[in-house]
Image (spheres, rainbow, N blue to C red):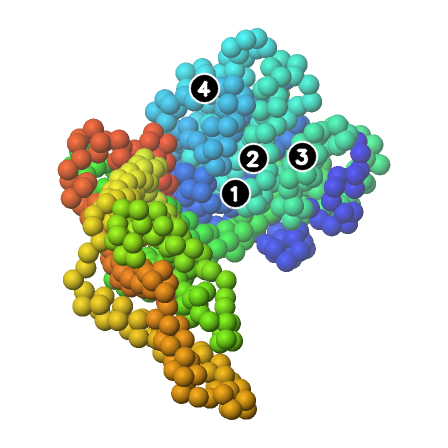
Amino acid sequence: MSAPGNYPIESGEPVGQTEGGVPYEHDSAYEDLPEEALTENPFDTESSRILFNAIDQLQSCDAGQDIDIPQLVIVGGQSTGKSSLLQSLVDIPFPTGQGCCTRFATRIVSRRTPPGSKNECVITIVKPDFDIKDYYSLNEHFNYDIRPNHHTFRYQSETLSAQDFLHVMKEVEEKYMGIKSGKRRGAKNFATEVLKVELSGPKRSHFSILDIPGVFATPVDVNVEEMEGVRRMVIEYLRKPQNLVICVADAGSDLANQGVFTLAAEHVQKSRLIGVFTKCDNLKESGDVSSMQHGWFVVRNRRGDEGISFDLNAAERDLFDSSPWAAIPKTRRGSRMLKKFLGDILCSRIRQEFPSLQQKVRDLLKETLAARKSLGDPRPTHHHRVQYLVDIVQKFQRAAQQALDSPGRLPSKEMRVRGIVAAKNRNFDDEMRDQGHYYEFEEKKPQKNPNVLESLPFNTEGVSDIRQEIREQIEIFRSSGLPGLLNIDVFPVLYKIQTQKWLDMATDHLHDVANDTILAATSILTLLNQEYHLCPNARDGFVEIIQDFHRSAHDKAEKLLIDYMVKEKEFPLQTTNPVFEDRIEGLRTMRIQEATRDHKKAMELWIEKKLKKDKLTTPAVMEMVDHVLTFLHYNADTRMENEVHDVLRVYYELALQSFIDFTTKRIIEDFVSSKTGPLLGLSTDYVLNLSETEVEKLAREDDSVLSKRDKYDEKIARLEQSYAIAERAWKQTTPH
């Protein structure tokens, strides 16, 4: 046997002690108590019994799937004497001997009832107290089917003899857990369900312990996947932070060869470990005994030939009170001391952890209720499905209307359509005025007449692009009229040229606004999904509907723009706006004024030059006046070019304003606020006009949602029951 110091607990630290956790103090305080004092149970007080029963009720309602419940768990390898130790701890005739194997976990719950009450034994099968996902995963790893009939088993009797217990175990294994021993295809040597044995009587004590299968190194009589399955099942129990783990070792075996201790070292904090050496009566060497003085408990097992009347406590006293066992602290010697210790730490752990357990139940219940609420109510009928869609759409409508009427109330800027569209319209207006024309209009001086006398030092400028186009078009249409007269057919041609960028710029503006609008609509839908967790069919279906509204409204708006420009180019140029003539007359006057101002300096220089030469005669002055008048009135071609330019400019500016108004007010505003647009199209009326098939497609629930809702309902029921149990127990045990 290797020394306990080889086990991963520091030498000299008693197993079961903690550092800042549950106060498992060394037991010297009751080390020398008389024997009768040890019959006292920590659960004998009323408050302790209430908490003990509350813990058992929590385990019974499967709360262990959701929260960690303090409990004792006993583990050990094959043939370590674990079953015999359980016999002495809980007084149940567990099968012992060669070939016996723990094939499923067994929870034993013992309660003391009032004097004069009857003994009672109730045996049932329950699910394990770890997460349900792990439960199903574990069965898959074992390659086991879930047996739904295990919950129907129930055995009840006033007594439980060894014969009765063997019969019960056999029935449970064969009929309810489907055990088929052997190493072959279809064999099932273990089960993941838990056998629960409840014992009560006036002479019993409050005690609870969970026995789980032991790990083994080689699959001698079991399938390989079962060996790994047992290992995983043991780990599931070991890693639960509230489980107090009792590791059982054969005192005559090397700990290094017992795999359960390796698992415990990996998955259990030292503060939760309690080491027990069994079969100590088989040790003969005193050196082996002296190596046990490191906090482990030592017990003697009942042998196969020692009947029910055998006094195990007396046998343990005889063994451990003698040398060399007496060197081990009395509080660590014998099953009686072990049970006393286990009762103390279980009671202490329950008392310490109960408040946090309560809070965990509250938090989980709140969290699960919120998750369940996010799935919505079941929708079994067409009416329920329509109502579900209407509820969503009404929320969407309110947010969509806010996007137009009071966008500042919405949480994100991409939803605030009114502000976005207003800014885009202003940008469109500026761009149309700055860049909407094909040629830049002349803003200042007209082109000078090339036939002006060179005696006037007038500067000339290059011909502008628009004047060059005007000259070319006048020349084209000159042949169909009298010389020197303007053919008015030149105006529609020049107007078409000058407005040829309008449609593309307006269409780009429409695309831009349309993208912003559908982004706002989908953002609102995303917000609703975050808050109300829409079912995937409704969420994806509504996105498609919004996109359909977007495409339809966009195509309609684009067609209106095209039709407008077709009419604008094909219809005769006409206007009743009185501003038209006023502006043209103003431009004519401005040309004369600018020409006079521009050439004032030139005339002054000419006059000064003539005066110096004494040539400023009346004929010379009259000649100068003729030249100036000729310049101001230009020649016929220049006058014609100027007139075309100014008429085209005034008409273009008036038409541009009309086009901007049409685009922003008729096209853009209709698009964003239309009852069939991407923002307001998804409405209650739309939903109410859907066919039953369309409603079914949008509102039907996936199997995953149905399954998730059922699981939430089950969990809520468990947690509500757990909450009621915990609250009731705490109120009963808390002083007022």
As shown in the figure, which amino acid type bears the numbered disc 2? Glu
User: Circle 3 is placed at which residue position?
Assistant: 263
| Contact? badges 1 and 2 (CB < 8 Å) | no
User: Circle 4 is placed at which residue position?
Assistant: 145
Q: Distance of mark 1 from mark 3, alpha carbons?
A: 19 Å
Return the residue nearer the eye: 566 or 637: 637
As shown in the figure, which amino acid type bears the numbered disc 1? Gln
Which element carries disc 3, helix, strand or loop? helix
User: Circle 2 is placed at which residue position?
Assistant: 236
Q: Distance of mark 4 from mark 2, alpha carbons?
A: 19 Å
User: Circle 1 is placed at which residue position?
Assistant: 71
Q: Residue at x 43, y 35 (%)?
A: 199
Quadrant of residue 628 in the image?
bottom left
As shown in the figure, which amino acid type bears the numbered disc 3? Leu
Residue 50 % position (x, y): 40, 51
Which element carries disc 4, helix, strand or loop? loop
Residue 655 % position (x, y): 26, 58
Which element carries disc 2, helix, strand or loop? helix
Drawn side of residue 352 relative to residue 677, left or right: right
Quadrant of residue 336 in the image?
top right
**Label for residue 91?**
none
